[in-house]
Amino acid sequence: MTAAAARTGLVAHVVRHDRDVDVALSVGPAECVALVGANGSGKSTVLDAVAGLLPLDGGAVRSDDRVLAGAGRGLPAHRRRIGLVAQRPDLFPHLSVLANVAFGPRAAGRSGREARAAARHALAAVGVADLADRAPGTLSGGQAQRVAIARALAADPAVVLLDEPTSALDVGAREDVRAALRTAVSGRPSVLVTHDPVEVMALADRVVVLQDGRVVESGTPAEVLARPRSGFAAAFSGLVVVHGTATADGLVLDRGSGGGGPLASAAHHVPAGRPVAAAYHPTAAVVTRDTGVGPGLPLVVRALEPRNGLVRFRTDDLSADLTLAAVAALGATVGSTVRVHVPPAEVTVWES
């Protein structure tokens, strides 16, 4: 049976008492799971434990029906068949690109000829076969990271771990590297740690949100990013998060004109009177002149900020992103009062 045919996925239960981490995670045999959360939420602890860089206090890690760690024992990192792609490529400067990529299969016991063949195949798979004879010092950041991905693939890993693999790259290099990453995660269990929602949408089949060392949310990227149930997931996806008290129709904001205003939600299941949070995308908000009538809340503009080709309207309560043309037509300035309306179907409410 080939290594690819034997893959059954990754099952990890990572317990570290000193870091207050207790995370259970399962990844299907051809699934990429994005692990997201604030700094200190436990992402790196989970990745390091799976990779064999950190011992467990409890739980276990299994891959391809092999026990990698658990019950006070574990395989060393080099025997786990884990392919790790980190923020920086860390290529051996004294070796050629081909020799760098061949290092893994050679260390695993394959002949020099077999290792070089595996390295050339991996380089071709991520689109950098022409770099084989180059020295690492002559590569751009994006090229070096694609070589690092090829190095991980050349060893035919049972599991791929991606630790913020594009965070050190400029915007222009990220798309080429993401294409290489799609090759890396295809057909094998993969865990992606990232702070980039675009990367989640491009690579992940499922998103797991960590907070204070625990799993607080899990679902498809569309579910988690479009209809989050946690504050971090809402902020991660670029949504505006507000707080208030639940009503039958949505919530009353904690602050606002006249001591707090209503914000409707199409559907939620939080009993009235409970403290809640709500999220919506800032492009969904409708801003009009305040004529004293009409839907929405009358709010004072506190700031106008350029943001990704749009203009962010900030008030004490709500924010909205408008095009430059819409801002010009509105004629609003800092200190003026506008009316902000968010359609109920765009508002997600959860108990806080």
Image: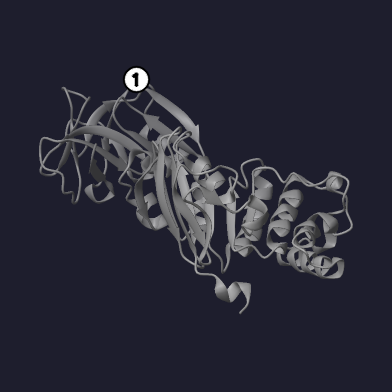
Residue 87 image offset from top left, x and y in percent: 64, 43
Residue 244 lies left or right of residue 75; in this view the side is: left
Amino acid type at circle 1 is Gly
At horizontal 30% and vertical 41% (from top left) the residue drawn is 279
Side of 215 where 8 appears, left or right:
right
35 displayed left or right of 111: left
SS type, badge 1: loop
Q: Nearer the viewer, residue 308 or 75?
A: 75
In this view of the protein, can residue 224 be seen by the observer?
A: yes
Residue closest to the far bottom: 1
Q: Nearer the viewer, residue 330 or 231?
A: 231
Vertical side of 339 occupied by 349: above or below: below
User: How many C-alpha atoms fall within 10 Å of the one at disc 1: few (<14), some, or many (≥20)?
Assistant: few
- Quarter of the image where one finds residue 320: top left
Q: Is residue 188 above or below residue 73?
A: below
Q: Position of residue 339 (x, y in %)?
A: 26, 33
Toward the top, the furthest residue is 335
